[in-house]
Image (spheres, rainbow, N blue to C red):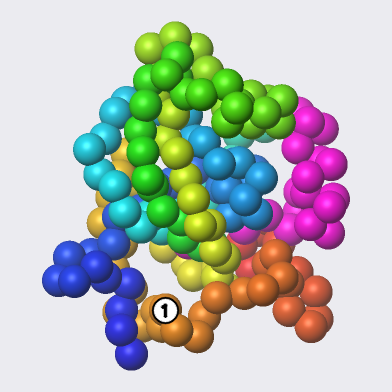
Amino acid sequence: MAGARLGDAPMMALTLYQPWATLIILQEKRIETRSWYTKYRGVLAIHAGSTSPVFDLRPFMPVLKRARLTADDLPLGKIIGFCDLVDVRPVQNIPRSMLTKQERAFGNYSPGRYGWILENARQIKPIPARGMQRLWNWNDRDFDFQNEFLSTPFRDERGPLFNQRGQ
C-alpha cells in the first residue's frame, strides 16, 4: 500500500475549523482565505481541527442540509479529504466570476489577505490526526489512495461516519 506521500516527502496538510473543512471537501468552498501566502502548489490533506469555535452556524446549514449533514455530523481532529491547491492570489486579484455570493459568505476577503484556489476536492473515511498551524507535513503510511475515497459525503450504508465528538 502506498502511504500519504508525494514521492519521498510527506503530504502537506492544512487544518481548518469546522464547518470550513467540510465545505471544502463538499466542493461548496473553492477558495480558502488566509492572512499569509505560500509558494506551495499541489495536493493538500484537509484536516478538521480538534476544536471548533462557538459561532452562528445558520449561514452554513443550507449547504450542510443538502449534503444530509447536521452540525453534529462534522468530524473533529481528523483528515477528512484532499484537494489540489492550484493558485494563491491576493484577494483583490481574484476574478469576480469566482466570487459567488456563497464563496464570499464562506471566506474573509479583507484587503491584505490571500485566496487559496482549490480544485478537485475528494473525501475519505476520516482518519484521526493531530493538526498544526499553517501548512504541516502529514504522513500516514497506511492510507491507500486507490481504495479509501468516498462517493457520498461522510456517510456509509449506516448513516454518518462520525459525529462532532470525532467518534
Is residue 17 located in the magenta-colored stretch of the structure?
no
Mark 1 residue crowding within 10 angstroms, few (<14) / some (14–19) / many (20+): few
Which residue is found at the position 33% from the left and 90% from the top? Answer: 1
For this orientation, the residue located farthest to the left is: 8
Which residue is found at the position 38% from the left and 47% from the top? Answer: 85
Q: Amino acid at mark 1?
A: Phe
* Above/below status of 141 relative to 113: below
Taking the image as shown, residue 47 lies to the left or right of residue 164, namely: left
* Above/below status of 151 relative to 109: below
Foreground residue, 58 or 1? 1
Measured as percent of width and height from the top left, residue 56 is found at 76, 28
Kindly indicate the quadrant of the structure image that contains residue 125: bottom right
* Residue 16 visible in this rendered orientation of the protein: yes
Which residue is found at the position 81% from the left and 41% from the top? Answer: 61
Kindly indicate the quadrant of the structure image that contains residue 164: bottom right
* Above/below status of 166 relative to 63: below
Dot 1: element = loop
Foreground residue, 75 or 111? 111
Is residue 73 located in the magenta-colored stretch of the structure?
yes
Q: Which residue is mark 1?
A: 145
Taking the image as shown, residue 105 lies to the left or right of residue 8, namely: right
Measured as percent of width and height from the top left, residue 16 is found at 49, 43
Measured as percent of width and height from the top left, residue 95 is found at 51, 24
* Residue 22 visible in this rendered orientation of the protein: no
- Read off the magenta span: 55-79
Which residue is found at the position 32% from the left and 26% from the top? Answer: 36
Measured as percent of width and height from the top left, residue 158 is found at 80, 81
For this orientation, the residue located farthest to the top is: 111
